[in-house]
Image (cartoon, rainbow, N blue to C red):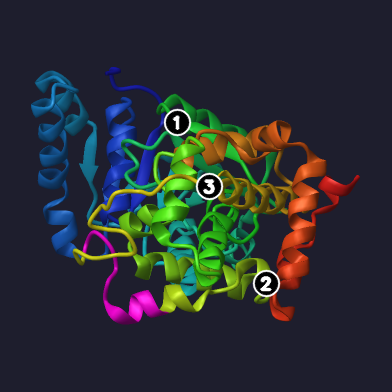
Amino acid sequence: MHPTIGPKIGIIGLGTMGLGIAQVFAQAGFPTIVTDAYQPARANARERMEQALNARIASGKLTPEARDATLANLHIAESLTEFAACALIIEAIVERLDAKQSLFASLEAVIPASTILATNTSSIPVASIASTAQCPDRILALHFFNPPTAMKLVELAPHAGTSDAALTLARAITEAAGKTTIQCPDRPGFIVNRCARPYYGEALALLAEGHSAEEIDAAMMAAGYRLGPFALIDLIGADINLAATEGLSAAMQNHPRYHVFPALKAQVASGNLGRKSGQGFIHPAQTLPKTNPEIALRIESTLINEAAWLLNEGGATPEGIDTAMKLGLNFPRGPFEALAQHTAAKVLAILQSLAAQAPANLKLRYAPAPFLTR
């Protein structure tokens, strides 16, 4: 626990994400100003944070003194004028472009030109949010993962017009709060949500070919993954996974690499969403069968190819992508580490074989990224 330090941080939006992000900064010693347009969310914010901190005390991860110091750093604001003193303001409001643009316009009327405006979006282009701003050079994304208090990764995404000064300060503040920041391009899904698609998508392709969900998960767990793709869908919720897949597919012009498989749509239509509904693809847990290493090699090859396509678009590094995938999804290795293990020749051979067997509408799904063929 740190004493109160450094610049004031503002958080707007007090849902699960916003309150969690506020706790991250308040716990790291930053004076943290928060608000929400919804009055009841403001009214119970301190109580909700105290409950979260008390749970950590109960599990032996926090002292009562640290809880009190964290809560002392939390200030609940009734109006946006109170954010004028902040060096960094992060919005965690509804995922709607007009709402985010409108909020930033209201903030720009009351804050100095030096204040950084960050969005926690995971699906809206940062450039679109910045397009209506007076000072677009101060706008960037700081994408936290749920729950923000436990997840180490923050994706830092500038748009083409973000200033170096804003990037440097946003990184420094976020890292001072104990997070690992990985810079990524302002592309749909940033790094983690984009590069994770084949983990689910190729598992669903295997399911469509007649493999069982249990067999597929067993193969990935034998390869070192903590959760197989179907256990992960069951954990996240099939409805959430479908929304993310459909959103990315639309943003990427319905390219076959983001194909929405009928089995996922059918799962959502059936209401068997996973843990939250009591029934999913493999939840409640069943005994996993003996493993098939070919399945793991196929899924990892498509993960490698997706990461290589993202690399091709610029704004990311192999090391950054690997770190993001390990921290954001608890993967045992990143795609480029997997590539070093398997070799480009083997991955290309697998992609070629998959393309040959795929139905016509999915052949392009396995087109190799230039990075693999150089």
Q: Does residue 203 appear left or right of residue 322 in this picture? A: left
Query: Quadrant of the rendered structure where residue 29 is?
Result: top left
- Which quadrant would the C terminus be assigned to in this image? top right
Q: Earlier in the sequence, mark 1 or mark 2?
A: 1
Q: Does residue 252 appear left or right of residue 155 in this picture? A: right
Q: Classify 10 Å Cα crowding around label 3: few (below 14), some (14-19), many (20 and above).
A: some
**Residue 256 tag number:** 2
Task: Tell me the amino acid under the disc marked 1.
Answer: Lys
- Measuring from the top left, give residue 3's x and y in whole percent: 28, 17
Q: Is residue 40 magenta?
A: no
- Which quadrant would the N terminus be assigned to in this image? top left
Circle 2/circle 3 CB separation < 8 Å: no
Please, what secondary structure does the residue beneath circle 3 have?
Answer: loop
Task: Tell me the amino acid under the disc marked 2.
Answer: Pro
97 vs 316, nearest the viewer: 316
CA distance separating discs 3 and 1: 37 Å
Circle 1/circle 2 CB separation < 8 Å: no
Please, what secondary structure does the residue beneath circle 2 have?
Answer: helix
What range of the chain is rendered magenta? 266-276
Residue at coordinates 37% horizontally, 35% vertically from top-left? Answer: 8
Query: Quadrant of the rendered structure where residue 125 is?
Result: bottom right
Q: Classify 10 Å Cα crowding around label 2: few (below 14), some (14-19), many (20 and above).
A: some
Task: Tell me the amino acid under the disc marked 3.
Answer: Asn
Q: Earlier in the sequence, mark 2 or mark 3?
A: 2
Please, what secondary structure does the residue beneath circle 1 have?
Answer: loop
In the picture of the structure, the residue carrying the numbered disc 1 is 179
Q: Give the farthest residue toward the right.
A: 374
**Residue 292 tag number:** 3
